[in-house]
Image (cartoon, rainbow, N blue to C red):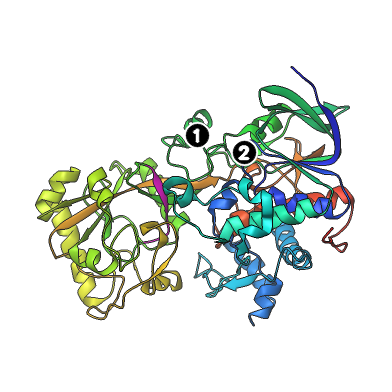
Amino acid sequence: MSINEDAYDVIVVGSGGGLVGAYVAASRGLRTLVVEKSALVGGTMAYSGAGLWFPGSAPLTRAGLGDDVEAARAYLREVVSDPAREALQDAYLEAGVKLIDELERSAWFPPFIHGPVPDYFVTAEGASPTGHTVFPMPLEIAELKENAQILRRSLPTERWDFDEGPLVSGGRALAGRALGAFLETGNGTVRLNTRLESLIVEDGRVVGIEATSEGERVRFRATRGVILVAGGFDHDRELREKHQAPLTGDWSNGVPTNTGDALRAGLAVGADVDLLDEAWFVAGLIQPDGRPVFHTGTRGGIWVNAAGERFVNETRPYDQVGHEIMRLHHSSDVSHIPAHWIFDQRQLDRDSFGGPPDEPLRPEWLESGALRKADTLEDLARLIGVPFDNLRRTVEEFNGYARTGVDESFHRGESVWDQMFHHIVPFAADPRQNFPAKPETEFPNPLLTPIAEAPFYVATIVPSDIGTKGGLRTDREARVLRPDGQPIPGLYASGNTAAAMSGRVYPGAGTPIGSSIAFAYRAVLDIVGTDGDVVGTDG
């Protein structure tokens, strides 16, 4: 065993949202080490669209939407409904505005743009129909030069080897830009294949980390602070079964290396925890390789449970659908895991499946059994093991709603969020992107079309997630707290390593990544003792 006693000002554990915090630290002259468990940087952020829910930030003002921070604050207060998290919410709102301003001063971060994604609780006070989500500009991968090879690929590229081309977007662009900016400061170091094992504590203060790298034990000291931004416990079976049964992590869309290392390290030094039963739940569509991918919504067909009955607005915001599946699992005598997505030939002809609407169904869907078909509804009921009488009644009721254009049971198609799906085919049909939908004029509501044209098809929906959201309890400066509410000196946490400021809800597109980088930013500001007015430079 070799011991490495290298010292830095700041150590950041995790290279997703942590890369942004690392850049903020390094740009202020702090010698900063990023420790990454895998061989690639980007974490689950690289799988994401990189939306950042940042009310009042410059991209929203440029889009003519004004400074609506107070409306967003009222919105958070209502939907989170947890006074204990109000200070975190205020800290988040303050950080988002300042962080975007700072990043846009770097050549690595051309102006972010607003993406019109409605807030998820559309009837709450302060909710915006155009949303508060901003996105980074795409990145020419060649700009990273030799570092391009260490940037994690997108989820569909990792899973199915899709060709992303020379221009990367979403989370890969955000991670790539942060990596380039961080290294260009001259104060940043990235250490790959290095797993956090424990925190080093001296006189009650966290002063570094012990890790395993290439089979050897190593130690790194941090003179100013350690920031844990290492994701959640997405793929740790023991923790998932303990806190979130029946989930085991097998259906998670988090990166495979998210196994709760930082959570355990924090617990070992006396940290408090919260929300361990929570995740950024989503519905997952089982793919031909047998694993799910994050599913944003459904234009056609219905989802039914083991009784052959609908149980949800299938186009409701994904976290709400994921939570509803989990709630029903624990509160109903009827199984909702898995759920069955049923549609007919009309929908297949209109939207295809597993790819763009103008491309035919790929044979692996049927060959693998991820998509099955039957000539009659009765045969389909037998295929999935649900009572035919119930399924027939459910389909007849839904077909009646299709004729009137009004979903009297679950109100599909009525909200601003739902109506987005008049215009797109959700990316879970093909996780590469959202595709423009084909126009539908035969029925009054494009989201309600009858299930009547044989053959009939069924796909499988399971509760998935884009990461756990419970973890170390922190204050507004991202300082990790003990059970008595006192901070552990020298220790900070952000992202899914920390308990979410949004509690048990998902307020809007970009809350997970937004929280990760906002609180990593606040951690650095606390370390350097500023309020954010000192801005970074390009080198």
Q: Nearer the viewer, residue 218 or 91?
A: 218
Element under label 2? loop
Q: Are marks 1 and 2 in contact (CB under 8 Å)?
A: no
Q: In this view, does 206 lie above or below 55?
A: above
Residue at horizontal 34 percent and vertical 47 percent from the top = 287
Residue closer to the observer: 450 or 123: 450
Above or below: residue 488 compared with residue 157: above
Identify whether 262 is placed above or below 523: above
Horizontal side of 328 relative to 132 (left or right) equals: left
Bounds of the magenta span? Answer: 291-297
Q: Residue furthest top?
A: 1
Residue 390 seen in the figure: yes
Instruction: Tell me the SS state at disc 1.
Output: helix
Is 108 in front, or is 325?
108
Q: Label 1: which residue?
A: 240
Q: Check disc 1 and give the amino acid type.
A: Arg
User: Residue 340 at x, y = what percent?
Assistant: 27, 50
Q: Where is residue 50? Give x, y as percent.
A: 59, 59
Report the residue at 14% width, 65% height from top: 452
> Which residue is tagged 2?
39
Query: Which quarter of the image is occupied by the C terminus?
Result: bottom right
Q: Is 28 colored magenta in this rendering?
A: no
Identified at 17% across, 54% down, the residue is 391
Task: Locate residue 453 relative to residue 58 in the image: left or right.
Answer: left
The mark total stands at 2
